[in-house]
Image (cartoon, helix red, strand yellow):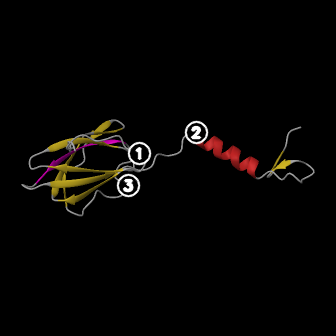
Amino acid sequence: MPQRNPTTIPPTTPSAAVTLGLTPGQSLWLCLPPGSALHTTQGEVSLRFAPRDCELALHTLPQMRLGAGEHLPEGWNTKAAWVQVGNALHCRSEILVIEAPPRPGLWHQVRHLLRSAFAGRDKTAKNRAFGKVPAMR
């Protein structure tokens, strides 16, 4: 069985979790989508954030370290963010990246509205109404 390179991230499905291992001295850049979570499951990692656009200025979050069992605060990234994750110790570290499920797109919302409109149709009604919306003749 071939060994997986810990720095390559396989394609993920919605709300997928990817575990990445870091050897001593290794670092990698991750692009974390909005709403994603980063957990340290083993060892200690240092995080360095890329500058973010805040209207007329660039802002860089301070560097931080996460020990085993720690994670980034809830709701820290409302936009996609680049983060450099590095192994801070002389032993193996491991992180778990959890992507948030994608928000439903416009087509999904329209389809849901149409389904709910037709599901509420009362076939015995005399005025042929769709829920609260009268039918066009």
* Rendered location of residue 82, percent (x, y): 28, 41
Measure the C-alpha gap from mark 1 to mark 3: 21 Å
**Over which residues does the magenta segment extend?**
80-88
130 in the magenta segment:
no
Residue on which disc 3 sits: 75
* Rendered location of residue 106, percent (x, y): 58, 39
- Callout 1: helix, strand or loop? loop
The image quarter containing residue 43 is bottom left
Measure the C-alpha gap from mark 2 to mark 3: 24 Å
Q: Amino acid at mark 3?
A: Gly
The disc label shown at residue 70, or none: none
Q: Quadrant of the N terminus?
A: top left
- Callout 2: helix, strand or loop? helix
Measure the C-alpha gap from mark 2 to mark 1: 20 Å
The disc label shown at residue 13, or none: 1
- Residue occupying the far right of the picture: 126
The disc label shown at residue 106, or none: 2
Q: Nearer the viewer, mark 2 or mark 1?
A: 1
Badge 2 vs badge 1, beta-carbon distance below 8 Å:
no
Residue 36 vs residue 52, the one in the foreground: 36
* Rendered location of residue 45, percent (x, y): 17, 54
Measuring 9% from the left and 56% from the top, which residue is drawn there? 91
